[in-house]
């Protein structure tokens, strides 16, 4: 058994939370550059320029990319040959979030759902843990903003609705969201599983690097079809009208019940914040 | 054609009615911040017939909940938040002379009608440009409801703060008309 100390987990989560909030991924920056050149709307091109300048300032001056520093989602892939010592695994992650948001001057955006009292330290993070083969621990920290999360949906379709129904669900979600999720967005789509699994697949789909095609050629083709449909809406950067409503659409699928066709659609603003490390 | 306009509050009716949907504006001078909780307080005071802690006549409200400032800095990231959450409170504030609001996302038909009635505008700032917009803020102080923390009403001093006219005094809506210009598929509705 390989041992990993709980304090190492806390330290890693703290650093990832701060890095994710200050540094936009190179893949996103490349996509924004393309938008700044190719967007037909002058106002849209100006939005792309502002977002690129924003990313430059955030990284250089250690400002958060956005004042909404998100609810912290953590994906942990825990090797089954790892033994966590010196503390509680889940609490070690929560403590990392607590320290990262305090020391990083990040906004604490979590509250009690009924009293609306702020929890004060951006905990509890939402933690998804998967036990995998091996003796490593992979941690991915994903601060998720409220604006784009609020416009996300899960649809429980009838199997007879098939691909046209799925396409309509995705287009409807983006259309009804309009300017609210801060387009240009990345659209994560999860098809299959159960109610919660479709939503989780949609969120995981957002983690794939931009510019890297889906490894399944059939899914890659469907992603291109969805991207075209979404961009034909004309919503554009910030909803002011334009060609780039979404930068990309990412699909993840898994088998579902013969009676079901669950579809999760998770919208992500340009601040696609996720950073990972392997311990 | 859209134009670029420099604005310095307090704004007059003439300045506001000259703004057209799609115009870029650069604001210098004072902005007041307010989010959900501060709006509730302001509207409660008006309903009770009491005076507001700040005179909103001719002023601009910025919907923002900044991240904490690092030591030595004026403010943290400070981009706009979703404006629709303030919709129910907005007509009452326009009635006492508020002339513009900065946020992101659509406004309700009631707000758009009130903009026409009271000669005011809704401005969109770039959602997600919190670091860029923070650099245009030169000073920040709490002027009302300090107990609300980051949601307290702040008085900001800004220089060349960029925004775009989304809803003008004629009831026009850039979120509708801009999208219509670029839509290639049916069914683009509110």
Image (cartoon, rainbow, N blue to C red):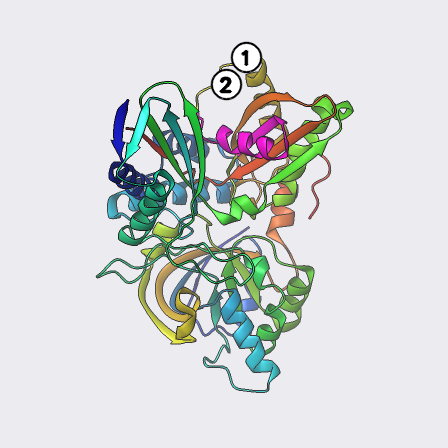
Residue A197 inside the magenta-drawn segment: yes
Does the image show residue B190?
A: yes
Q: Give the range drawn in magenta.
A: A187-210
Labelled disc at residue A141: none
- In front here: A265 or A77? A77
Q: Does the segment drawn in magenta span residue A152?
A: no
Judge from the rendering whether residue B2 lies leftward or rightward of residue B32; answer left or right.
Answer: right
The numbered mark 2 sits on a residue in which chain? Answer: A
When asked about the image quadrant of residue A75, the answer is top left
- Residue at horizontal 66%, vertical 42%? B180
Q: Where is residue A3 in the image (x, y as percent from the top left)?
A: 26, 28
Q: Which residue lies furthest to the left in this view?
A: B72
- Whether A215 is drawn above or below A233: the answer is above
Mark 2 crowdedness (10 Å alpha carbons): few <14, some 14-19, many ≥20: some
Asked if residue B109 lies left or right of residue A24, the reply is right
Q: Name the residue under label 1.
A: A217
Q: Are marks 2 and 1 in contact (CB under 8 Å)?
A: yes
Q: Name the residue under label 2.
A: A214
Q: Which residue lies furthest to the top in this view?
A: A217
């Amino acid at each position: 058994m390989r041992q990993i100390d709980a304090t190492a987990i806390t330290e890693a989560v703290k650093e990832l939370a701060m890095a994710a909030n200050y540094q936009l991924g190179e893949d996103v920056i490349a996509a924004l550059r393309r938008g700044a050149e190719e967007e037909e709307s002058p106002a849209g091109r100006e939005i792309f320029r502002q977002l690129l300048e924003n990313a430059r300032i955030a990284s250089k001056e250690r400002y958060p990319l956005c004042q909404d520093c998100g609810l912290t989602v953590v994906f942990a892939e825990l090797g089954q040959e790892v033994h966590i010592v010196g503390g509680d695994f889940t609490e070690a992650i929560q403590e990392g979030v607590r320290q990262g948001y305090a020391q990083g001057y990040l906004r604490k955006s979590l509250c009690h759902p009924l009293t609306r009292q702020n929890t004060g330290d951006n905990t509890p993070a939402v933690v998804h843990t998967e036990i995998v083969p091996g003796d490593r621990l992979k941690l991915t920290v994903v601060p998720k903003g409220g604006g784009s999360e609020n416009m996300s949906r899960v649809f429980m379709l009838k199997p007879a609705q098939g691909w046209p129904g799925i396409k309509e669900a995705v287009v409807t979600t983006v259309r009804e969201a309009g300017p609210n999720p801060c387009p240009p967005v990345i659209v994560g789509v999860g098809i299959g599983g159960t109610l919660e699994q479709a939503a989780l697949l949609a969120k995981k789909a957002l983690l794939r690097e931009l510019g890297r095609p889906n490894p399944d050629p059939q899914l890659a083709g469907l992603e291109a079809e969805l991207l075209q449909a979404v961009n034909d809406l004309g919503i554009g950067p910030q909803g002011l009208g334009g060609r780039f409503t979404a930068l990309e659409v990412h699909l993840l699928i898994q088998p579902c019940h013969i009676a079901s066709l669950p579809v999760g659609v998770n919208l992500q603003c340009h601040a696609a914040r996720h950073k990972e490390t392997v311990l | 054609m859209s134009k670029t306009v420099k604005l310095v509050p307090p704004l007059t009716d003439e300045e506001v009615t000259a703004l057209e949907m799609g115009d870029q504006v650069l604001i210098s001078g004072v902005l007041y911040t307010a989010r959900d909780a501060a709006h509730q307080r302001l509207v409660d005071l008006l309903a009770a017939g009491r005076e507001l802690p700040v005179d909103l006549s001719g002023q601009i409200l910025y919907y923002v909940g900044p991240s904490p400032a690092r030591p030595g800095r004026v403010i943290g990231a400070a981009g706009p938040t979703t404006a629709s959450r303030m919709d129910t409170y907005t007509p009452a504030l326009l009635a006492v002379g508020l002339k513009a609001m900065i946020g992101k996302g659509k406004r309700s038909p009631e707000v758009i009608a009130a903009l026409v009635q009271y000669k005011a505008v809704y401005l969109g700032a770039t959602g997600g440009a919190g670091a860029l917009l923070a650099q245009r803020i030169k000073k920040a102080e709490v002027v009302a409801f300090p107990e609300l923390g980051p949601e307290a009403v702040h008085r900001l001093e800004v220089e060349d703060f960029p925004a775009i006219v989304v809803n003008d005094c004629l009831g026009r809506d850039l979120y509708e008309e801009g999208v219509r210009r670029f839509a290639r598929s049916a069914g683009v509705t509110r």
